[in-house]
Image (tube, helix red, strand yellow):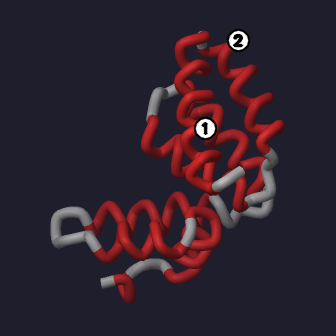
Amino acid sequence: MSESLNQKGLQTRREVLGREYVDHAVGQADAFSMPLQALVTDYCWDQIWNRPGLDRKSRSMINLAMLCALNRGHEFKLHVKGAINNGLTKDEIQEILLQVSVYCGVPAGVEGFRLAREVFKEMGI
């Protein structure tokens, strides 16, 4: 099924999120969910992530703040891993979450810190 996906977007997606995660997501897609995989791969990972206006580290910072503020825990954890892959440090992620706490509410920040700690533990950092 992955042959029908935008290959440039798929490459970027794998580089940020990890080959194992992406290949599993695509491999589990069926006739119902494959159009979503194609949409995400094309628009998110090629049309946006491959634009020249921001580097991947900056895009990761923005994603972490937005996903934390929106309380999207699963995607937030995934993008914490991606942020590390894109060169963010634990200290930088801490600063992002402190800013989210002030501008989006302490409960959002508390949850972001909790989820980020889970990812750091899983990654051994």
The residue positioned 49% from the left and 27% from the top of the image is 70
Q: Position of 86 compared to 30: left or right?
A: right
Q: Position of residue 89 (x, y in %)?
A: 81, 47
Mark 1 falls on what kind of element?
helix
Q: Position of 61 compared to 121: left or right?
A: right
Relative depth, front residue between 80 and 39: 80
Mark 2 falls on what kind of element?
helix
Which image quadrant for residue 87?
A: bottom right
Which image quadrant for residue 114?
A: top right
The residue positioned 52% from the left and 83% from the top of the image is 7
**Reading the chain from its start, which is encountered first: label 1 or label 2?**
2
Q: Amino acid at mark 1?
A: Ala
Relative depth, front residue between 59 and 16: 16
Residue projecting furthest to the left: 31
The residue positioned 72% from the left and 42% from the top of the image is 61
**Mark pair 1, 2: CA separation:** 17 Å
Q: Few, some or many C-alpha atoms within 10 Å of disc 2 (few <14, some 14-19, many ≥20)?
A: few
Q: Which residue is mark 2?
A: 102
The vertical placement of 49 against 115, above or below, is below
Q: Amino acid at mark 2?
A: Val
Q: Which residue is mark 1?
A: 116
Instruction: Specify the quadrant that holds the N terminus.
Output: bottom left
Q: Position of residue 88 (x, y in %)?
A: 79, 49
Which image quadrant for residue 40?
A: bottom left
